[in-house]
Image (cartoon, helix red, strand yellow):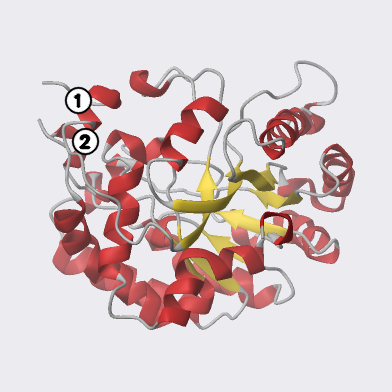
């Protein structure tokens, strides 16, 4: 069965819908080697450009940390600065136009350990120096669950720890944002954290971390209401922005990656609409942004197909609301200036 890779994705060709609609893709990664998934061991400017130029009008993108190209030596806490340096170089290369018109990594999100408290300032300063015009903040994922079937990204209850909150206050004081990924049972913890630090802009990844595998599999009657309640609680915090995407990953419980032929945008839109529309209802278009999460989500569908699906499921919204969902919210939150492109 031809699963994954360009040959498999090519089995579901589609014309691009609304090819002139401006897009800012606020969530993708870049790496020069990755052991898994095998089909996407390398994902740099040429591979990204192939996806970005598949038909949609992607004006700019945001790079999200993925723990690549860390410095090989020096203080442990400073090693993630290497990733920002690496991506800053790629963004500078992209700005020359050799890989198309899209402003790749117009904003850069690195990683720093907020548990360092006030000491995290030195790391953030180094990242700002490495990328003076593009660095916008960090992602410190906090996913934790007692199930051995889920990967823990940090210790239990880290959002309520004094050190983590001290580090987050440093971030807020510098005008930087916090990107976070977690599991939906942690949403109440995130709401408490966001309330405690109201000056910090928090970007919640992947529709709030819905989990439908392991102990959460085949329990939609309980899991979906819990996810909805958690999201509603977080939505009451005006400093939280939500990303709509990331659902091609295994933990969301869909089987798209295991199909003989990749899913098309019509079926994908129908599957996603109940989830995405609930998110938009709770947060509003001005606090939501469609994301690709590529190449991670590329294991389930192509770039062209997922953005076609987003366009299909958002048809009922006004032109200004759709502009926010596809471009304007991300451009505002990440402070991306498109003036040079006209």
The residue where tag 1 is placed is: 3
Q: Secondary structure at mark 2?
A: helix
Camera-nearest residue between 178 and 313: 313
Mark 1 crowdedness (10 Å alpha carbons): few <14, some 14-19, many ≥20: some
Mark 2 and mark 1 in contact (Cβ < 8 Å)? yes
Task: Name the residue located 65 percent from the left edge and 69 percent from the top edge.
Answer: 332
Tell me if 42 is positioned left or right of 111 in this view: left
Outermost residue to the front: 342
Res. 257 mark: 2
Camera-nearest residue between 208 and 11: 11
Point out the tag, 1 or 2, that comes first from the N-terminus.
Answer: 1
Q: Give the Cα separation between the discs numbered 1 and 2.
A: 7 Å
Camera-nearest residue between 40 and 101: 101
67 is higher (above) or lower (below) than 275: above
Give x and y (percent) for residue 243: 47, 61
72 is higher (above) or lower (below) than 111: above
Give x and y (percent) for residue 116: 78, 46
Q: Quadrant of residue 4?
A: top left
Give x and y (percent) for residue 210: 33, 58
Say whether residue 181 is visible.
no
Say whether residue 166 is visible.
yes
Tell me if 77 is positioned left or right of 53 in this view: right
Task: Name the residue located 29 percent from the left edge and 25 percent from the top edge.
Answer: 6
């Amino acid at each position: 069965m031809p699963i994954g890779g360009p040959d498999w994705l090519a089995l579901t060709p589609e014309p691009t819908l609304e090819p002139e609609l401006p897009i800012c893709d606020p969530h993708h990664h870049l790496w020069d080697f990755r052991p898994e998934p095998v089909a996407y061991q390398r994902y740099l400017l040429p591979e990204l450009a192939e996806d970005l130029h598949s038909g949609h009008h992607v004006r700019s993108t945001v790079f999200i940390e993925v723990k690549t190209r860390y410095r090989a030596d020096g203080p442990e806490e400073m090693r993630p600065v290497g990733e920002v340096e690496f991506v800053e170089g790629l963004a500078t290369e992209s700005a020359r136009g050799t890989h198309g018109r899209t402003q790749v990594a117009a904003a850069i999100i690195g990683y720093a350990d907020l548990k360092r408290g006030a000491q995290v300032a030195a790391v953030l300063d180094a990242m700002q120096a490495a990328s003076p015009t593009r660095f916008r903040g960090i992602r410190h994922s906090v996913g934790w669950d007692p199930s051995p079937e889920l990967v823990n990204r940090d210790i239990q209850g880290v959002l309520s720890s004094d050190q983590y909150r001290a580090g987050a206050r440093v971030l807020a004081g510098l005008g930087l944002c916090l990107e976070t990924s977690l599991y939906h049972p942690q949403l109440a913890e995130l709401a408490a954290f966001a309330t405690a630090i109201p000056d910090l802009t928090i970007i919640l990844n992947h529709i709030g971390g819905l989990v439908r595998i392991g102990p959460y599999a085949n329990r939609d009657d309980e899991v979906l209401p819990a996810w909805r309640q958690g999201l509603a609680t977080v939505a009451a915090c005006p400093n939280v922005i939500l990303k709509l995407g990331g659902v091609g990953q295994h933990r969301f419980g869909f089987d798209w990656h295991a199909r003989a032929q990749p899913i098309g945008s019509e079926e994908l839109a129908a599957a996603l609409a109940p989830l995405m529309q609930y998110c938009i209802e709770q947060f509003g278009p001005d606090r939501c942004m469609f994301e690709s999460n590529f190449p991670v989500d590329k294991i389930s569908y192509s770039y062209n197909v997922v953005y076609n699906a987003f366009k299909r499921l958002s048809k009922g919204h006004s032109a200004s609301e759709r502009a926010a969902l596809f471009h304007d919210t991300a451009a505002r939150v990440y402070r991306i200036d498109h003036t040079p492109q006209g």
